[in-house]
Image: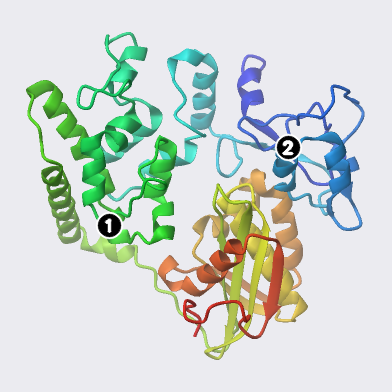
Amino acid sequence: MLAAKAVLKSGIRRTIGSGFNTSIWADPWIPDSPARPPRGLSEERDPLIFVNTLIDFGTKQWKLDRLRELFPPEEITLILGIKPSLRVSSDGYSWSMTKSGNYTVKSGYEAARTISRPVCDHPSQGPSVTALKAQAWKLKTTRKLKHFVWQCVTGCLASCQRLFYRHIGRDKGCSRCGAAEETINHLIFECPPARQVWALSNIPSSPSLFPSPSLYTNLDYLYWRGKEVGADEESLRIFPWIMWYIWKARNRKIFENLSVPPQETLDLAIQEEEAWRRANTQEEPHTVTAHRVQVTIPEDVPVCYIDGSWHGEEARSGHGWIAYFGGRMVHLGLKGSRRSLSPLHAELETLLWTMKCLVAIPMTSILLLTDCTDLIEMTSNPEEWPTFSTELVDFGYYRELFSSFRLQYIPRSGNSSADHLAKCARGRGFCFSHVSSTVPDWLSLEESPLP
């Protein structure tokens, strides 16, 4: 256990309940990567001052004046993303290298490798890629292409730059366009032949959006964010094949001196994706059917659709809910708040705020519908999600106030109204909340999917 102490310290984060058990300057409670104590405005450190001194127990909010006295603005932004819960008597711990906050052997192994790996061995690929690596194995494509995308994320693809840093190659430049370094991102996204392939595809691209100089940003766009700017699922599902055939075209140029036209590269990707999809549809009809989710909406129980909206480059999160009874809308809510720590935090905050609003109406018999499966999992097994322990205590408190309560999954396509409300709330750019039985005047009815 002592030998593994360094590994545990690299991934442990203190979760804040009441703050009485967490030292401000000694414990790793700031949700950075890795978690750490905060940086102060001065060098003076009182070891006996605890986080509870930063919380206003009357309003259950952080003391902004006190935060400004102690911390620089960038630290205050991180602290405000933490939601203290006065219903939790003591603070806890979570493992920051998994989504749930639970330690796993796999994530511990990755942490140990990171500690033992020389800093110069891996040039920075961008922010933490844990979520990107996990998503690579969830793609609807062949095992070979899943592994290929995973190699791109982890920096294992044999680009000239990677080989040079491994002391295998002598030249780290791009032999196709003459760029100083053939990084993985350059090879797949930024090299002129690769850019032409992406431009010819149906995936929306622009100089300021995609492709970008960051591998993290590009894959994040293809995994998730592309849908927010108008890319449809049919266009996005082909991207693993596009990446693969860009790689193949690059190899043909280097090893065979054959130039594959960008249109031919794209055509090959489209053909292979269509062939794979047809084969899987024909060979596994029962599997496809099993994954269809049939949602029965009762007419005798109020139904509430909820959704959160989060973007890493924006200062606000958006939260939206809309309640129906007997086939007509009876209430809706929109809220703009300080940006949550993660998209999943935004979803959970939406759930808690919705429950609080419904109790106040009151509407204490409800079926809640969400397109976030993790939200359902964490509320069903809260002990398995220590990262969200304080918020889940609040969930348990509000849950007891309902006479009938059920949280159920609905496909994203069926949750467009709540999604629209959450995005509109985030787009306003400031903190506010609106709960009403009517649509607010500033919400464009032309753009709104509300009935």
Disc count in the image? 2
In the displayed structure, does residue 263 sit left or right of residue 309?
Answer: left
75 or 347, which is in the foreground?
A: 75
Measured Cα–Cα span from mark 1 to mark 2: 39 Å
Residue 450 place in picture, x, y as percent: 51, 81
Residue 395 place in picture, x, y as percent: 70, 61
**Of the numbered discs in the image, which one, if any, rests on residue 424?**
none
Mark 2 element type: helix
Residue 167 place in picture, x, y as percent: 33, 8
Q: Which residue is mark 2?
A: 75
User: The disc labelled 1 sits on which kind of residue?
Assistant: Ser
Q: Which residue is mark 1?
A: 235
Categorize mark 1 by other alpha carbons within 10 Å: few (<14), some (14-19), many (20+).
Answer: some
390 or 3, which is in the foreground?
A: 390
Rendered position, 438 above or below 321? below
Residue drawn at x 44%, y 66% as measured from the top left? 412
User: The disc labelled 2 sits on which kind of residue?
Assistant: Glu
Quadrant housing residue 281: bottom left
Rendered position, 216 above or below 111? below
Q: Earlier in the sequence, mark 1 or mark 2?
A: 2
Residue drawn at x 45%, y 79% as measured from the top left? 296
